[in-house]
Amino acid sequence: MKLNVELTPRSNIPTWMAYGTPVFTILAALIVSGFALFSLGVNPLAAYNIMFVQTLTTSFGITNTLVKAVPLIFAGLAVYLPLKARLWNIGAEGQLIIGAIVGTAVGLSVSLPIYALLPLMFITGGIAGAMWIAVPAWLRARYGINEIITTLLFVFIAQSLLNYVVRGPLQAAESNFPQSASLPTAATLPSIPIIGFPSGVLLAIVLVAVTYAIINYTRLGYEITFMGANDNAAEHAGMSKLKIYLIALMAGGAMAGFAGISEISGVEGRLRASFDPGYGFTAVPIALLGRNGAFRVLLAALFFAVLFIGGSSIETSLGVPSAITNVMEALIILFLITAEFFKNYSVGLSLDQTPTPSAPGDPEGDV
Amino acid sequence: MSGFVTGLANATVNASTVLILAGLGELISERSGVLNLGVEGMMLVGALSGFVVTSITGSPWLGLCIGILAGGAMALLHAFLCVSLNSDQAVSGIMLTLLGVGLTTYFGNPWTGDSVSGFSEVTLPIIGSFLVEIPIIGSALFNSTPTDYIALLLIPVVWLFLYKTNIGLEMISVGEDPETADTMGIDVFKMRYLAVIIGGLFAGAAGAHLSLAFNQIWSSGMTAGNGWIAVALVIFARWEPGRILVGAYLFGLLNAIQLYSQGLKFTLAPETALSGLLNPMIEFVMNPTIMSTYPYIVTLLVLVITVVRAENRQLAQPSALVQSYSREID
């Protein structure tokens, strides 16, 4: 008896599958983490009620979600954009931290009116993020060194630098804590008048739209996507791999830099050693969920923002360790990559008594 | 001074064991062509499960075994995703780390801060009693926990396994050129499964060593980035088991200096030329936080120097690393 598994690549993906995958993925992750909640004596339904329903039905919850979504949207784009050229920016975390450090340093040391200082902080933060990925980008584009490993190595260097500056050069003079001085008002992202939403949200949405336009309507976007689909063909068509790879990765780095400075300027108000709970790594599943379009990145980032906010809600109200959000995040990636497989292959199972060698002369399956 | 050097040697040897174990495991996995970025997660799961089993049963050996198996179980998931489902190895690895961090923080909560009586230091039997008398490194090397000895022993074992056994050579060939290996009749899928799982067993051992021998406590995130350093270490070692030892001692030494340098100040006398310029620079490079970046910087330099110098030759990296393999279906 032998179990035969037969895989056939799908030529076209059924519509229900394409649209159902994210939904199925999230549901499956919630069901499995339900067991983890249950094992600590927590009713999963009650927990999910607090996590999702309460977060999305109270204005407090919605505002917090939007605030949380800002760095996640930027960071999601930081992984999404290089992914279009089939490059993995696993180190968005590092570029995010460097963007935050440089942006904060500018905000603290330059005195300009708000309409000049904020753009300056974002530009320098973005440039810093782009420079932080420049070496991995160059090594990838010029020498073919795997960008996954090099961008990752730069994350750990960035984390140490953050720890250094908040205890050294940027530490507030009067403070014993590892943190910088508070940013002046001119360096703080204001709330939108009347509705009171943080303006970082608008900025993030604008950047999503810009990314969408670049990818879909410009020559550069076309070249990036082409390079990602088939780099050899793209090179034969006269495109420069070096140029495209550098641009895609460094644009991603700049996005991550925006994520860092937007979090400092819009939420934290000062640089702290622990300001970043790993937005740059959460960006990986966000970009995966949203890999088919910049606006899906936005949706995925919003979903993870709900997860973060809901996770801390159940920690305070039910005493569940908020690490459950890490577990959910991992499960979402797990089911997502599993679903990718079933999207790309149709699986046939058959049991037969004896392995039948195909008879010689059998007509080959010409379909 | 000799007390300082002995202390430094001791700290170096102690800090290196976890890197040797995790690094060897990652090396085996990568030699078969599968990058596993989940080392940190596998280590944490190994550390917690080893700790819990030892707390309950009182047997560190049983704890170690369970920790090893737990690491292997995590790796099995990675192997299934990357080898059977052709998933992206980087994504699956990140998932594994997130899962390990999440699960151990979530379920390890009640044990946080608890201590356990794990492995104690023993002098190596028979020959150890003379060897501990060797100045500076004697007690560091020959008066250690069992897991320290096991780690050192595993370096030649892994070398022999990879280069002198059929399975090891087949694993390497699968990592270099899976298509050819397949036509030669080697089961690519089986080899990669095996290599990834062995890698997980090693990572589990590294984690259990941390919670049962090195620290003998449980705290969430106690691996403190050692899993990532292990990934860097494999690159530093350019995928050779022997160089893992060199790298682990170098990174362990950097780690030890970091701890010991906090009480030390190296400054040039104010009358020395350029002291005004050099002293702040010395202070910066000797800063413990800055020193913690050295393993990564050294790894990057090794990577860059190797490829730039040998542009025409291959980087020692397995040629099929990060490439999934599937048989062509006509």
Image (cartoon, coloured by chain):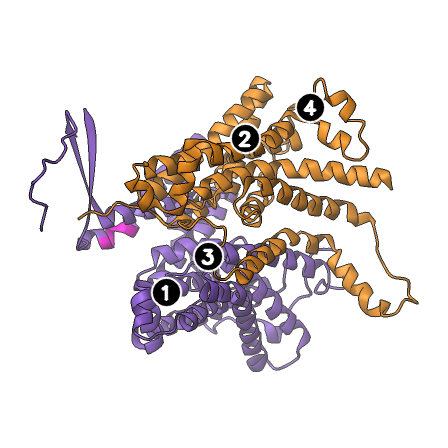
Chain colours: A purple, B orange
Label placed on residue B157: 2
Question: Which span of residues is magenta-colored?
Answer: A18-22
First reached walking from the N terminus: tag 4 or tag 2: 4
Q: Chain of mark 2?
A: B
Binning the other alpha carbons within 10 Å of mark 2 as few (below 14), some (14 to 19) or many (20 upward) gives few
- Left or right: where A258 falls relative to B245: left
Whole-angstrom CA distance, mark 4 to mark 2, is 24 Å
Element assignment for label 2: helix
Question: The residue under label 1 is which amino acid type?
Answer: Ala
Mark 4 against mark 3, which lies toward the viewer? 3
Label placed on residue B161: none
Residue on which disc 1 sits: A85
Mark 2 against mark 1, which lies toward the viewer? 2
Question: The residue under label 2 is which amino acid type?
Answer: Val
Element assignment for label 3: loop
Element assignment for label 4: loop
Q: Chain of mark 1?
A: A
Binning the other alpha carbons within 10 Å of mark 3 as few (below 14), some (14 to 19) or many (20 upward) gives some
Residue on which disc 3 sits: A146
